């Protein structure tokens, strides 16, 4: 669930720069083509110009990034293919073909870039063959060999470079957003995820509940059994959380003995039921440390995004107050609305 939002923002900025460049280049070529008395080329660049203006506006309004990037690439690739099909209009237009892998991988990453590049290169080879038959003296075998070598070289370089960067960035991101003891996500990860969930709520009313959990009398466990036992208990609780959550649900260690659970698509009534199931599981499944039984109980608060706060700071204030209420009412309980 934790996409790297910074990477999306970086790609969005890159797309904006490319759109501006395309507008300037397209406008220049449009004027030049008109001056040369051409018809097809000015029409194609006029269409691209208008489309890019719309993409610039949509990108600035933060429309979904994926469709914007794909639309831009399809427009650019379509113009390149059109020019390759008509070498009589632009005899060396095939030199733009190696740029397709670069643009695709920069804007779509290693997976999206792979499929976009493969589709574009298949179409590009077909266009080159057809264009070569149209004007054979311009597109000979030597040109074909050079073109294939340059394009495949750029394709391979982009693929392996962006794939290695993706794996390295994913590993670093996971490490920075994970709790080293329990393996759960940490508080920073929760705050990042809530930003995205807030956007989903704002756009389509997406439902989400959050559970805030605190182990009761955890200090007594540390004092009686030692801090190693306390760490063992935290790992034990984290394991129980994982086994009682759906695939879409996410558990976090907030720090100390406090945990949180996000339940996408779940209203507060469902969140209360999940929290109660977790409470019973932790109560009935004691931890074991060096042959001794450590009985556990938890207190929990539950809140729903929207009903109890539309941003994380407000939602956290409410769910934290409900957790505190559960503590003051005797612990070992769940408090919701």
Image: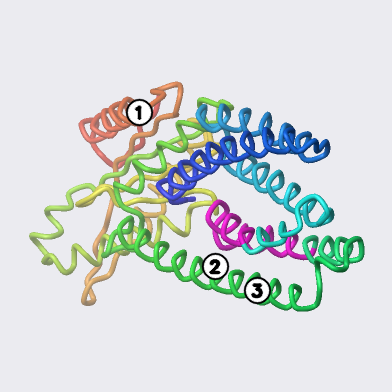
Assess whether mark 2 and mark 3 are in contact (beta carbons under 8 angstroms). Answer: no
The disc placed on residue 152 is: 3
Placement of 275 over or under 287, stated as above or below = above
The residues tagged by marks 2 and 1 sit, at their Cα atoms, a distance apart of 43 Å
Q: Quadrant of residue 138?
A: bottom right
Closer to the camera in the image, 92 or 321: 92
Q: Which residue is mark 1?
A: 315
Q: Which residue is mark 2?
A: 158
Counting residues from the N terminus, which is met first, the one under dot 3 or under dot 1? 3
**How was this image coloured?**
rainbow
Identify the residue shown where x is 47% and y is 36%.
Answer: 197
Identify the residue shown where x is 68% and y is 58%.
Answer: 116
Magenta includes 104? yes
Q: Main secondary structure of the magenta part?
A: helix
User: In the rendering, at what x and y percent does residue 280 appear?
Assistant: 40, 49
Secondary structure under tag 3 reads helix
The residues tagged by marks 3 and 1 sit, at their Cα atoms, a distance apart of 52 Å
Residue count near mark 1 (Cα–Cα under 10 Å), binned few <14, some 14–19, many ≥20: many
Placement of 297 over or under 176, stated as above or below = above
Magenta includes 167? no
Identify the residue shown where x is 40% and y is 51%.
Answer: 251
Assess whether mark 1 and mark 2 are in contact (beta carbons under 8 angstroms). Answer: no
Residue count near mark 2 (Cα–Cα under 10 Å), binned few <14, some 14–19, many ≥20: many
Q: Quadrant of residue 147?
A: bottom right
Secondary structure under tag 2 reads helix
Placement of 315 over or under 155, stated as above or below = above
Residues shaded magenta? 99-122
Counting residues from the N terminus, which is met first, the one under dot 2 or under dot 1? 2
User: In the rendering, at what x and y percent does residue 215 appear?
Assistant: 25, 49
* Residue found farthest to the right: 133
Closer to the camera in the image, 158 or 196: 158
């Amino acid at each position: 669930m934790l996409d790297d939002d910074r990477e999306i923002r970086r790609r969005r900025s890159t797309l904006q720069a490319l759109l501006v460049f395309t507008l300037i280049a397209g406008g220049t070529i449009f004027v030049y083509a008109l001056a040369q008395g051409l018809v097809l080329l000015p029409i194609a660049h006029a269409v691209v110009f208008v489309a890019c203006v719309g993409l610039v506006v949509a990108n600035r309004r933060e429309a979904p990034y994926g469709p914007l990037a794909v639309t831009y690439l399809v427009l650019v690739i379509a113009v390149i293919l059109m020019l390759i099909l008509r070498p009589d209009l632009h005899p060396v237009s095939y030199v733009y073909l190696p740029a397709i892998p670069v643009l695709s991988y920069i804007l779509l990453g290693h997976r999206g870039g792979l499929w976009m590049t493969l589709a574009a290169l298949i179409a590009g080879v077909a266009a080159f063959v057809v264009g070569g038959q149209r004007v054979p003296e311009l597109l000979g075998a030597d040109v074909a060999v050079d073109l294939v070598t340059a394009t495949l070289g750029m394709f391979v370089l982009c693929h392996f470079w962006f794939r290695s960067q993706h794996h390295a960035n994913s590993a670093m991101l996971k490490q920075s957003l994970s709790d080293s003891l329990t393996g759960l996500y940490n508080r920073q990860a929760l705050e990042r995820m809530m930003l995205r969930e807030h956007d989903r709520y704002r756009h389509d009313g997406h439902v989400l509940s959050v559970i805030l959990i605190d182990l009761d009398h955890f200090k007594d466990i540390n004092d009686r059994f030692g801090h190693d036992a306390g760490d063992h208990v935290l790992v034990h609780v984290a394991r129980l959380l994982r086994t009682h959550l759906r695939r879409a649900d996410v558990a976090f260690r907030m720090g100390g003995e406090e945990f949180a659970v996000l339940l996408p698509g779940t209203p507060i009534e469902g969140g209360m039921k999940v929290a109660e199931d977790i409470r019973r599981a932790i109560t009935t499944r004691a931890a074991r440390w060096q042959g001794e039984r450590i009985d556990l109980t938890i207190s929990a608060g539950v809140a729903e995004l929207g009903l109890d706060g539309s941003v994380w700071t407000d939602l956290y204030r409410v769910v934290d107050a409900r957790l505190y209420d559960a503590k003051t009412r005797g612990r070992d309980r769940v408090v919701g609305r």
